[in-house]
Structure formats: C-alpha cells, structure tokens
Image: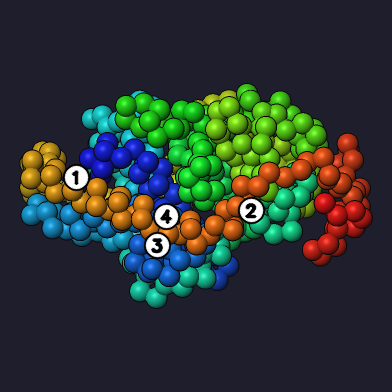
C-alpha cells in the first residue's frame, strides 16, 4: 500500500473517500448498508452518481487485496470491506505529522486496526442515497443563505440522522477534505484543492493530514456569519451554483463545506457546525483525537461480526520488504490500473458534459433576492415547497 501511495500520491485521498462512501451507505433506521465492501464488489454501486469517479481507488485496492492473498506468507484473508476501511486508516496515519511511514506509524497500522468485516452478498445501489451530496435541488444556483441552509440539512439528514454521527463527529469527518481535491466532478479544468497543505504533492511524500481545513474557515474567511458572507464572499472570487473558488489559489469549497464556517440560520433545520469547526481549528490534537474516534465508528457502521486485531504470523514476511520482482509487478499493475481509470473517467466526463457545464457556469450574485432574510436572520418562511415566497432568483 505504501508502494502505491509513494508512486501515486492522489491515492491516499481517494482511498479515504472510498472508505467513507462504502461505510456511509449505512442507514441506522432500517438498518441497512454500511462498511460491507459493496463499493468494490458490486458495480451498480459505482454507477450511482454519488459514487462517481472511483475507478482508481477501487481498482488499486483490488490489486492490493489480490496481491495480499497470493503472497506465500499471508496468514490472514481480508474482505473488500476490510481493505476499504484499512485504506483510510493507512492514509490518514501515513499523512499525519510528517507524511510517510515511520516505525511508530507502522506499529500502529499493524497493531491497532481491527479485521473481520464480512462482505455483503446482496448489495443495494439505493443505499448510495444515504451518502451526503452537495445539494443540487431547489437551492442550486440560488442565494448563498439558502444554499448553505440546504447543505446543512443534507449533513444532518445523512451523516447524523441516518449514519448516526454526532455533530462533533460529522464536522470532524468532513475534515478529511484537508487532503485531496475536487478532482473530476467539475471537469479536469476546474479541479482544485481544498487546502494548500493537502495538495497531492505538498511534500515529497504527499499531502499533510491535519486541521488545516477547519483552520481555513477561521483564518481565511472574514465573515463570521452567513448573512455577512452572503453579501461579501471573500476570499472567493468565483461563485458557482453549489461551490466556491478562490481563483488565485485554485482552492475549491463546496456548499457542504462552507456551512461549517457559520452559525446556523435555523437551528430547527440543522445545528451550528461552526462551534466544532472553531474548536478543531484551535487545536490539531483535539481534531485528530476526534477524527480517529469518528473514523473508527465509521469503519464499523452496519458491522455485526466480531472484529479482531491481527493475529501473530509464523512467518515475518521477509521483514515486510518487497522483492524486486514484486515491485516490478506492482508497478506495472498500478500503471495499467491508472491508465484504465483515466480512460473511464474521460468517458464519464464526456457523458456528463451538460451537467459539468452547468456546475461550472458562474452565477450572478447581484440578482438574488431572499424573501424573509434580514440582517437578523429569517423572518417568516423563505419558501413554500419548491417555490419562493416572493421574487425568484
């Protein structure tokens, strides 16, 4: 896994996203979905729009899983559900502090992860509806206040009400955006990082995983409430239908990111996420502790089987070092997988040309009118059903 991450830095953020999209299919109210391997094992899952662009992480995890099982010194079988969750565990540990593996990090990877998740044999692609998405409904392209309100509701309804996370846990998990970028959904031309330190090549060993995502909202966004931000979008110069871009830095933030920066305009719709955003921004150790706890909970969503720490192997696997032939095999397999993934991504982007064009068309913020919105917040209902009470935007 470290060999792949060293050769292709984007994989650490892609494996991180993949782990959440497998586990985040869980709905505690039924209960169905969860950390069950369906993202790898059932093609219909990656055909869902919420699970787009997983070609590279899924194919590389399959290579690693097959290589693991074919190794003569392997003494434990792993499921797709396991390898997906180990992917995020590996990635955030590797990228924490000074990116790369150290002896203490390797010991943590070996000793702390729990194995034994069974793969689901009857996957249901409808479980993808439990994943939070950047809203594209009636708030799409509308006033920022409404967009952020709907984004906040999306987080509450999916991450909290269905997945079962607390407000604190939800805000911590979204902090995984510290590493990686909006890579393909807006087209390659509009790909952009969230945080400079999270760039694929921020260091020779890849991005840095820390609290910089939350610190950005405190240090770089002047507005302290949503009403002020709706009038003054700094530091963002480009406003798109459901995302923002800091043009000079090519940093992209989704509506579901920006709602974390401000107090809730309607506590009955969603809580004030910004309370924890500010706490995480102030203390990296507090963020890391909360994130790893929430990640552990995430990795067990929907899992009813007994999980166990790895058992001692009789063989030491040649000290964990890859032989020359193994490196050559993995290098070739990685290159082939990435090439095939890019071909699939190109086809998907071509098929979604109209959607991408709409997503990357700038909105005119001077034409917005928000009924019921004042400097003091909401006055009455802003809309009824899917229509506005008053002028449309």
The residue carrying mark 1 is: 331
The residue carrying mark 3 is: 39
Lower sequence index among marks 1 and 4: 1
Circle 3 residues within 10 Å: few <14, some 14–19, many ≥20? many
Q: Are marks 3 and 4 in contact (CB under 8 Å)?
A: no
Circle 2 residues within 10 Å: few <14, some 14–19, many ≥20? some
Lower sequence index among marks 3 and 2: 3
Question: Which-is-in-front pick, marks 1 and 2?
Answer: 2
Question: Which-is-in-front pick, marks 3 and 2?
Answer: 2
Left or right relative to 311: residue 359: right
x then y, percent, for residue 13: 41, 42
x then y, percent, for residue 93: 35, 37
Circle 4 residues within 10 Å: few <14, some 14–19, many ≥20? some
Secondary structure category for the residue under label 2: helix
Question: Which-is-in-front pick, marks 1 and 4?
Answer: 4
The residue carrying mark 4 is: 346
Q: In percent of the image, x 30 and y 51: which residue is there?
A: 339
Question: Which-is-in-front pick, marks 3 and 4?
Answer: 4
The residue carrying mark 2 is: 358
């Amino acid at each position: 896994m470290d060999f792949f991450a060293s050769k292709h830095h984007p994989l650490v953020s892609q494996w991180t996203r993949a782990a959440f999209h497998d586990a985040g299919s869980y709905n505690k109210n039924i209960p169905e979905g969860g950390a069950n391997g369906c993202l790898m094992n059932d093609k219909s899952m990656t055909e869902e729009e919420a699970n787009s662009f997983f070609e590279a992480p899924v194919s590389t995890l399959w290579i690693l899983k097959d290589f693991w099982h074919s190794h003569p010194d392997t003494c434990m079988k792993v499921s797709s559900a396991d390898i997906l969750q180990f992917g995020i565990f590996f990635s955030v540990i590797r990228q924490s502090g000074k990116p790369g593996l150290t002896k203490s990090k390797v010991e943590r990877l070996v000793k702390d992860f729990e194995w034994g998740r069974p793969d689901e044999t009857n996957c249901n692609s409808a479980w993808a509806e439990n994943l939070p998405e950047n809203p594209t409904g009636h708030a799409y392209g509308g006033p920022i206040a409404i967009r952020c309100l709907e984004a906040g509701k999306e987080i509450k309804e999916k991450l909290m009400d269905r997945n079962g996370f607390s407000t604190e846990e939800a805000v911590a998990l979204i902090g995984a955006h510290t590493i990686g970028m909006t890579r393909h959904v807006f087209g390659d031309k509009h790909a952009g990082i969230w945080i400079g330190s999270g760039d694929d090549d921020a260091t020779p060993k890849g991005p840095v995983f820390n609290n910089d995502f939350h610190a950005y909202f405190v240090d770089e966004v002047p507005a302290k409430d949503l009403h002020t931000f709706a009038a003054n979008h700094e530091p963002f110069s480009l406003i798109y239908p459901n995302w923002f871009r800091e043009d000079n830095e090519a940093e992209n933030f989704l509506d579901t990111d920006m709602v974390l920066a401000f107090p809730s305009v309607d506590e009955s719709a969603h809580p004030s996420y910004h309370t924890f955003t500010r706490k995480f921004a102030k203390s990296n150790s507090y963020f890391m502790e909360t994130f790893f706890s929430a990640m552990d909970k995430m990795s067990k969503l929907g899992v009813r089987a007994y999980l166990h720490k790895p058992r001692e192997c009789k063989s030491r696997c040649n000290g964990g070092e890859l032989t020359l032939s193994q490196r050559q095999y993995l290098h070739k397999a990685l290159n082939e997988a990435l090439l095939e993934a890019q071909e699939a991504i190109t086809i998907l982007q071509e098929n979604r040309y109209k959607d991408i064009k709409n997503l990357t068309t700038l909105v005119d913020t001077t034409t917005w009118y928000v009924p019921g919105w004042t400097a003091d917040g909401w006055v009455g209902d802003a809309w009824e059903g899917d229509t506005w009470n008053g002028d449309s935007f």
